[in-house]
Image (spheres, grey):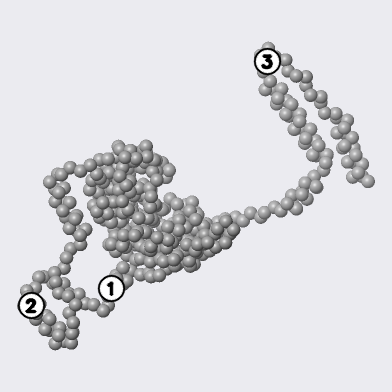
Amino acid sequence: MNPTEFPVAQTAGLTKIFKDFWRRDRVVAVDDLNLEVRRGEVFGLLGPNGSGKSTTIKMLLGLLYPTRGRISLFGRPPTDVAVKARIGFLPEESFLYRFLNARETLDLYGRIFQQHSKQRRERIDKLLDMVGLAAESKRRIGEYSKGMARRIGLAQALINDPEFLILDEPTAGLDPIGIRQIKDVIRELASKGKTILLSSHLLADVEDVCDRITILYGGRERSTGSITDLLCREDRTQITSEKLSSETIEEVRNLLQRSGQKKILSVGAPSDRLEKFFMETIERAEQTNARSSGARRAGAIADFLGETKPVNVVDQLVSAADREVPVMPVTPVEIRRKASDEPAKQIIEQLTRVDAASTRHAEEELPAASDVPPAAPPAPEADRSVIDALIKDKKDGDDA
């Protein structure tokens, strides 16, 4: 298989059970979950509260360990440090430093990824323009609305140009303009080869941007497939044309009745979605240069996000576990045996050397006599005859 065809993220029998104080099973958050997120697609993870979405994401990120099952990210375990640099994550709640402004926040995350100053400045400018915060970049994060905080959170998730982007409720707190812009950004990133995992309760947003979805309930997978296949109504036929006259509609009715179609469900003019109507209204207002203190219209996708990265075949085929060198543990019994085999003479001589070295070191660090008050009389030296007697007894015992 071509390395580029490998799933970006894959789970097999993934299970997470939370236990109580007595180590008894309390909650089965994820139960035997099998996921496959393919390269370059937008994958939706759906389900009501408590269905296991956030727990699954945390296990993919290596923040939680599964009770059983396997997880693979780019062919490696999620705990592999090399994998972290290839992932961008926007959590459900962005906990950012309130006293930093937008530029300082992105600069901080750029430093974490060890980007040099020129690269950080270029990426920060492009990301701020992309999320519509270039004009508000000098304001402190603590002064931002929730929607503006979500925008800067998306920018920090993209600062490292990730191959795999995990978005947990990316449109939460955004106004309709922001929602539309974030959805456009997601589709544009997918067209540039990014792989995106999206978790959201707003089903209309998921329907607009996702290629495939998985619906969870009770920690188990209930339905998986492409949006088109899952939503297609095989028992209905829809015909859309230019506006028809009442006479033509009547002729169509008669034709359908003659062909055996007994019932026509509905005939009427199609309607646009409210989102489309709302966006058109705002665009007309913007054309009149109406003022607004919120985020501006998002700019183009930052060009560095479309850069292609070479695929390392070894990284795809070799797991981190294969490179680990096992370390044989040393049992307490072996430790005691080694200690008992060492001659008593060596132990005593080692103690004597340590005592002499400590005495010399203390004498070197003592200040001049004129600078300190008279010291207490020195402690009596160790009786060498006692030590010699111990060594002699040991030799006599060994000879016997």
Separation (CA) of disc 2 from disc 3: 115 Å
Marks 2,3: beta carbons within 8 A: no
Residue that carries the numbered disc 1 in the rendered image = 232
Residue at horizontal 24 percent and vertical 44 percent from the top: 294
Residue that carries the numbered disc 2 in the rendered image = 248
Which mark, by number, is residue 12? none
Amino acid under label 1?
A: Cys
Q: Nearer the viewer, mark 2 or mark 3?
A: 2
Please tell me which of labels 2 and 1 falls first in the chain: 1
Please tell me which of labels 1 and 3 falls first in the chain: 1
Residue at horizontal 80 percent and vertical 35 percent from the top: 349
In the figure, 293 relative to 49: above or below?
Answer: above
Separation (CA) of disc 2 from disc 1: 28 Å
In the image, residue 329 lies at what x, y percent?
67, 54
Amino acid under label 3?
A: Val
In the image, residue 15 lies at what x, y percent?
50, 64
Residue at horizontal 49 percent and vertical 56 percent from the top: 64
Amino acid under label 2?
A: Thr
- For residue 195, which quarter of the picture? bottom left
SS at mark 3 in the image: loop
Please tell me which of labels 2 and 3 falls first in the chain: 2
In the image, residue 85 lies at what x, y percent?
43, 50
In the figure, 95 relative to 55: above or below?
Answer: above
Marks 1,3: beta carbons within 8 A: no
In the image, residue 250 lies at what x, y percent?
9, 79
Closer-to-camera residue (176/165):
176
Which mark, by number, is residue 372? 3
Residue at horizontal 11 percent and vertical 80 percent from the top: 252
Separation (CA) of disc 1 from disc 3: 93 Å
Are there few (<14), some (14-19), or many (20+) residues within 10 Å of tag 1?
A: few
Marks 2,1: beta carbons within 8 A: no
Closer-to-camera residue (134/271):
271
